[in-house]
């Protein structure tokens, strides 16, 4: 099912964000990506509501949207017929 497939770069972004909030510049350096490529992948993740951004002065920080991930896990468990 392609709906659950995730681009490898977006997987790496999510795994890095699991560690906590990070600026877009630091994220680009860590992932060895151009700002343009990173922006593309971040926009896909934001559109899917998996991450959110906050701005502080001239910096943009990204974080995992844990509430949507928790909802997704609960939904998957319901599909599998498991209790909470």
Image: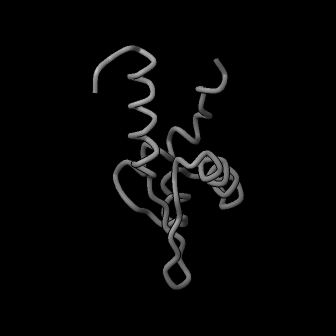
| Residue 16 left/right relative to 55 | left
| Residue 17 left/right relative to 57 | left
Residue drawn 50% across the image and 58% down it: 27
Between 40 and 37, the one nearer to me in the picture: 40
- Residue 17 image position (x, y, % from top left): 42, 51
Q: How many marks?
A: 0
Between 77 and 42, the one nearer to me in the picture: 77
The image's colouring method is one colour
Between 13 and 63, the one nearer to me in the picture: 63
Q: Specify the farthest residue to the top.
A: 81
Residue drawn 48% across the image and 54% down it: 30
Residue drawn 71% across the image and 59% down it: 36
- Residue 65 image position (x, y, % from top left): 45, 52
Up the image or down, 26 lies above or below 58; here it is above
Q: Quadrant of the N terminus?
A: top right
Up the image or down, 23 lies above or below 27; here it is below
Q: Specify the farthest residue to the bottom.
A: 57
Residue drawn 28% across the image and 27% down it: 84
- Residue 59 image position (x, y, % from top left): 53, 76
């Amino acid at each position: 099912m392609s709906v659950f497939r995730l681009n490898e770069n977006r997987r790496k972004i999510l795994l890095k964000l699991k560690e906590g909030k990070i600026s877009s510049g630091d994220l680009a350096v860590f992932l060895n990506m151009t700002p343009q490529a990173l922006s593309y992948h971040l926009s896909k993740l934001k559109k899917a509501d998996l991450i959110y951004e906050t701005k502080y002065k001239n910096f943009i920080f990204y974080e995992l949207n844990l509430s949507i991930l928790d909802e997704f896990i609960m939904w998957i468990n319901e599909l599998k017929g498991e209790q909470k």
